[in-house]
Image (cartoon, rainbow, N blue to C red):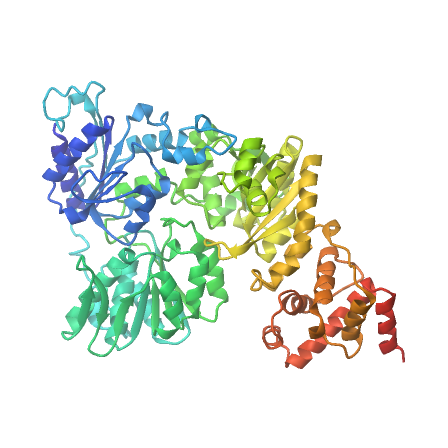
Amino acid sequence: MNVGTLASSLSREARETNERRALVLGGDRERGYACLEAILSTLPVGITDTTLVGPEDRLRCEQIEQPHAGRLLGTTRQVVIVDAHEDLQPNALGQVVGAVDGGGLLILLTPAAETWSDRRNGFDESLAVPPFTIDDVTGRFRRRLVETIREHRGIAVVEFSDDGDTGSAEPAALAEDELVANGLTNPAPILSTPDTAPAAGIPPDAAFPAAAYEACLTGDQVEGLAALESLAEPGRAVVLDADRGRGKSSAAGLAAGCFALAGESVLVTAPSVANATELFDRADELVAELDAEASVAADSQGVPREIETSSGGRVRFRDPSAAASECEAADVVIVDEAAALPVSTLESFLAADRIAFATTIHGYEGAGRGFSVRFRDRLAESDHDVTERTLTDPIRYAAGDPVEVWAFRALLLDARPPVAPLVADATPDSVEYRRLDPDELLADERLLREAFGLLVLAHYRTEPNDLARLLDAPNLEARALVHGGHVVSVALLAREGDLDAEARAMVYEGGRIRGNMLPDVLTSQLRDEAAGEPAGVRVVRIATHHEVRARGLGSRLLERVRGEFGSTVDWLGTGFGATPGLLSFWRENGFRTLHVSTTRNDASGEYSALMLDPTSDAGRALYDRHAERFARRFPALCTDSLADLDPDVAREVLRSTPDEAAPPLEFSDHEWRIVAGAAYGPGLFDVDPGPFRELAGRYFLTKPDAVDLSAREERLLVLRVLQGTDWATVADRLEFHSAGQCMRALGEAFQPLVDEYGSAAALEVRDRFTTE
């Protein structure tokens, strides 16, 4: 058997079934590359349809490194080769699998299967979080990957013998025992392919040209295109989501062409211009068919990048940053591969009047699930009338494609928590606290899928790399609450701190340390060299099944975590994109705020909060000094880098700061007269905002029972007093009739604060203006 012949057989069967096949070449790397040369010489595939994903440019085709595999999003290839000898990043594997077209071949170049899990690679180094070393990292993820490769149909496996003796001088020749599996499925003949399938039909009330619908290959795609017609009306938004290969980008391209033919300006954006290739190809084909006078500007590769129609319409690409600044001027904006963009960037596109988002459900696309978990809520809260369509019918390859089935299982791309009826009656009293041991997860596929699926659905940053971290990272542990054997709540925990003096000094002097988020921030940004000495456990993720939320299960899980770890570490901590609900949840569970980032997180679009719950004297000392420093600096930050912080987030941040951290009020009698005069008399806030800011901060931090301000009054304190927002803007946001009414409301809000905190001088002013 020759490896070229094997690859040809796989390729032929893939083309005949409109599926994909995979070929794994395990063992000697140099022989693997010699076999690749033979394969590329044998297959009838052009060089432009072949990509090598690896560290070196060793083949006569496109080459990219694994960290840049996201460049393949939105593109297709007939052959994709992954060199996994030195490294295998799960995110990259998920990205490249989706780029293989129907009839194509995925080739993995790997170490020998028996030793692969015992070898350590570049990704493993990222898991070696101090004080752990790479020797502490395990190989469970790769062991599981090898098992899935051997178990799934459509995957040929070649294991080169150690001695390299094939009985032939040709390295592509295979000894009989080197072919472990030929990967052929020998399917029954199929009667039709997407190219010969009957037309899906044209909606009777279609506004787009018939040619656009005739170009659709499935009923799903027709429905997606029909949904995009709604963008003809103002204030509309459309979301098309699907697994890879379902034609969402093609539908978006057809819609873009239709709008351009109607004389409208369509702005297209994606993580990179290459990601929009499919969209522009479909738009170009449609416009060329219907408008002979249209012009197309292509890049150096001949790929369309700007299309102009004779009616004055156009389709043009802009990178995300440029698109964000130009989106209001466009008639229609289309965001392709939306899940690969930060939530903050996606939010900026909401300034567009008519906008569409095309996004992948299970591909993660390199940036977690910010679109699904965080951005959908923002979109729903916007002024847009939102239409959503999910495309499920495969187009690029047939349903049940073996490579897709394998990738979904290997990377748990379709992991789901248990179905609702199995956990519907779970309560804090009915659940069992359980350690999710990595070896047990490896042995129990259902348990692994339930736990990881819960993390995927609940958290915007969960991605395939996290599966490897869960199984292999020495600093991570998982705990869960199970009901009837099914996971209802799960927490991913990271050991942090306990750093030696050398490591602490390195961070203090500007170095970075992996996997120690809280010590790193407290040391490098907040200049506390001793912050890395206490040992802690950070709650990286916590998720509760949607069916049983608001029953106290998340709090019960944290209670059990505290009971298990509290006596062995100095603190429990967490960090997350700050929202009022999350801050309230952590505050109610004993955590207090120590820091809020001064820039928004790219993935969540939110400012990040760090919170701590001390469990020892050393943890308490760390907690006390940083809480006090935070309470002093936060009001000043509100007028600077946090000037756009949501007022409700600011309220919860201050409420979740310990009372004892509040700085004392040290006002002069004159300052008290300024405040009391504005509260009870004709005085003005604008004369001297300083004491008002300190008093408002004191109120939020100490939360006295005697003061009962409304939510609107508290937002007024944040916006005008802490953040310094101008009167007109505050009045508009809080729906006051005028700036004058807003000013009077601020004075009234300070009255109970003067009553609670005021000195004799303040109370004298109050009495002067309130005594009849």
Image position of 501 (left or right of 188): right
Q: Residue at x 70, y 40 (%)?
A: 620
Q: Residue furthest front?
A: 509
Q: Is residue 195 above or below residue 443?
A: below
Q: Quadrant of the C terminus?
A: bottom right
Nearer the observer, 410 or 84? 84
Q: Residue at x 23, y 19 (%)?
A: 162
Image position of 634 (left or right of 344): right
Q: Quadrant of residue 222?
A: bottom left
Image position of 620 (left or right of 284): right
Q: Quadrant of residue 233?
A: bottom left
Q: Position of residue 387 (x, y in %)?
A: 40, 66
Nearer the observer, 81 or 747? 747
Q: Residue at x 33, y 51 (%)?
A: 243
Specify whether residue 557 is in view: no
Specify whether residue 275 is in view: yes
